[in-house]
Amino acid sequence: MSTFPDLAIYAPMRDAEDYAEVFLRSAAVHGGSNRYRVTMSILVGDSTDNTLDVCRAFASELPFECRVRSLNDLPDGVRSEIKAIVESNDGFFNECIVDWLVSENLEQSTYYSGIHVDIAFRRSGLWDDLLGKMIATGADVAGIFAPGELLTRPDAIFMTPPRLFPFVTLCHRERAHALGVRWSRPCPTSSRRDRLIVDNGTLALDALMGNRAAELGATFLPITADYLDQFIEHFGFLWTQNVTSPEHEHDGERSRKRLRAELERYRDPTAGARKR
């Protein structure tokens, strides 16, 4: 029997103190697996809040092994490499770092999941159900598939390519590597329109539809937001804490309001009862 884990969950984050607390508190209750061996690897980027301390405080409560590191724990050369990756992805420190963690892969897991931390686990069984489906279908990648977005500009109206949303993805490590599935962009883009066309998920989708995928008989398992809603709540828009976004400003405000209510529930379980 292999001593390696079946699944490694990769969770890069920065400036995510409250989101990280909800993510880890909820994972402690509902984030484990009854059927598979799971580990988690958290890498915290340069933060202006207490994200690292929160991760170190709550990681020990998880129902599986979890290693927490900051960029400052890594050698100078590695920090420079990660800085270049982040710069080539418009300064966003999220799914682009999943590629680096997969390449490092100290866990040597059969499957990996790249996950955003702006979620809360609501019910147990996500990993058991998803891994069971992937194994049964021989899938290489599972993720949320979404149609393109219609953009109107004074000079043109066009539809962006279909996308894979990487806030929860699951990949077979060796087969996804053979396909060239990646979640980071190769270079920074100049406009929002370009970022939608050259999207992190779009590049992964291209890998699943190319000639190499046909040669290898690649299988993609589409999952939906409704399916994930059985197990998790996705708050979304964590990045709007640090990035001005006229388009998503109010979405970010709503996200943080819901998050504050969730934090209150965890920190003071009697609060909800008192309000009723």
Image (cartoon, rainbow, N blue to C red):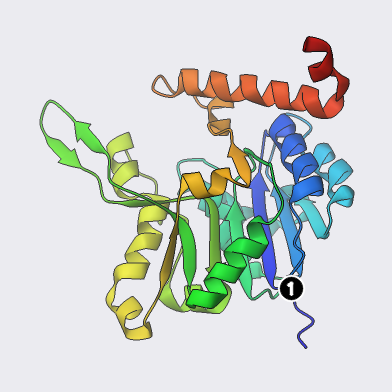
Is 195 situated above or below 271?
A: below
Q: Whole-percent x and y of residue 195?
A: 34, 43
Q: Is residue 166 visible?
A: yes
Residue at image mark 1: 5
Q: Residues within 10 Å of mark 1 (few under 14, many from 20)?
A: some
Is 218 situated above or below 262?
A: below
**Residue 273: quarter of image:** top right
Q: Residue at x 69, y 39 (%)?
A: 46
**Residue 116: quarter of image:** top right
Q: Residue at x 61, y 62 (%)?
A: 129
| Horizontal side of residue 137 vs 8, given as left or right | left
Q: Nearer the viewer, residue 48 or 119?
A: 119
Q: Whole-percent x and y of residue 209?
A: 30, 69
Q: Residue at x 82, y 60 (%)?
A: 64
Taking the view exactly as shown, the residue that stands out farthest to the top is: 275
**Residue 236: quarter of image:** top right
Q: Secondary structure at mark 1?
A: loop
Count of numbered marks: 1
Q: Nearer the viewer, residue 183 or 127?
A: 127
Task: Give the quadrant of the C terminus.
Answer: top right
| Horizontal side of residue 77 vs 219, given as left or right | right
Q: Is residue 191 visible?
A: no
| Horizontal side of residue 63 vs 39, given as left or right | right
Task: Give the quadrant of the N terminus.
Answer: bottom right
Is 102 situated above or below 149?
A: below
